[in-house]
Image: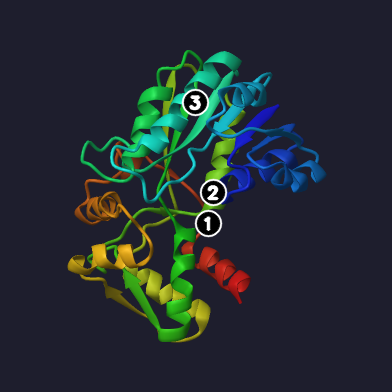
Amino acid sequence: MYAITGITGQVGGQLAHVLLHGGHAVRAVVRDAAKGTPWAALGCDVAVADALDVAAMTRAFSGADGVFILLPPNFDPSPGFPESDAIIAAFDAALRASAPNKIVCLSTIGAQAVEANLLQQLGRMESVLGRLPMPVAFLRAAWFMENFVWDLASARDQGVLASYLQPLEQPQPMIATADIGRVAAELLQQTWSGVRIVELEGPRRYAPLDVAAALAAVLDRPVRAEAVPRAAWEANFIAQGMQHPLPRMQMLDGFNAGWIRFEAGPQNTRKGATTLDTVLADLARRSA
């Protein structure tokens, strides 16, 4: 049996469907019992556990051959990342107490970076959970292609992709959540010892200019990429409701400057099969 946290999200949901399709038993770990109902209908065991409730998490992970850990995303963390640190500590305690056979954690490109930025939350997770006594795999995923769902409206209505990734011609590693789910499912079914790092990106890299062209094809209208001036980032993010925009800005700086990158280099990354065109077409269909 495989226990999956974050099952109501894109990656966790994709992972669960792959495992269920393969005939594997799945335990859906959810914070709200109502969100577990659809998964119970698909044949999943459901465990209700808040990420900070060590006892409930321990029960959810007990008896599992493998556990998938997804740190709840926090794009506007307090200084010093206290929210994520508390959840990481709870995961650590629950995993030590439940002692599953193996663990797969969703991490990120650039988790090894020493420069301050938003993704350090996942680097801290790797540091803590990497000391667990059972085999642990960190799946470092590239920029999610599904992030461009937030750009569909402006592309459709104004023909503009406002890009924080810059320069516009600079390709960035990206990955579809479907591919992350598939690779996570493979890892959960494998055997290894110690700590393993798997870095995952799509079949090719895409620059903002490529994204604009793909949006134009999907929406059947011209779309141009425009770089958002660095001086405008903080005001933009605060206007969106953020209280602490600096870590997000630092993360974008890291992608743009190239110090948020895969540790092993592009020649050694695992490659997914799903293209950006496929993901954008699906997003456009669902948003129509």
Q: Secondary structure at mark 1?
A: loop
The answer to whether one can see residue 20 in this image is yes
Label 3 SS: helix
Q: Are marks 1 and 2 in contact (CB under 8 Å)?
A: yes
Image coloring type: rainbow
N-terminal of the two: label 1 or label 2? 2
Please state the horizontal and vertical placement of residue 87, each as a whole percent of the image: 47, 32
Quadrant (top left, top right, bottom left, bottom right) of the N terminus: top right
As helix, strand or loop, the secondary structure at mark 2 comes to helix
Residue that carries the numbered disc 3 in the rendered image = 90
CB contact under 8 Å: marks 2 and 3 = no
Q: Compared with residue 174, is residue 279 higher up or lower down, i.e. above or below?
A: below
Image height of 38 relative to 124, above or below: below
Residue 104 lies left or right of residue 18; in this view the side is left
Q: Which mark is residue 14?
A: none
Residue 274's mark? 1
Residue 153 location, x and y as percent? 48, 77
Q: CA distance from mark 1 to mark 3?
A: 34 Å
User: Image height check: is 74 above or below 63?
Assistant: below
Quarter assignment of residue 95: top right
Tell me which numbered mark, 2 or 3, is placed earlier along the sequence.
Answer: 3
Nearer to me, 267 or 211: 211
Q: Nearer the viewer, mark 1 or mark 3?
A: 3
Give me the residue at 66% from left, 19% from top.
Answer: 62
Can residue 99 be seen from the camera position used here?
no
Placement of 135 over or under 202, stated as above or below:
above
At 36% from the left and 53% from the top, the residue drawn is 173
Query: Which residue lies under the disc numbered 2?
Result: 179
Of 248 and 217, the residue lying toward us: 248
Q: Earlier in the sequence, mark 1 or mark 3?
A: 3
Looking at the picture, which amino acid does disc 2 mark? Answer: Asp
Q: Quadrant location of the C terminus?
A: bottom right
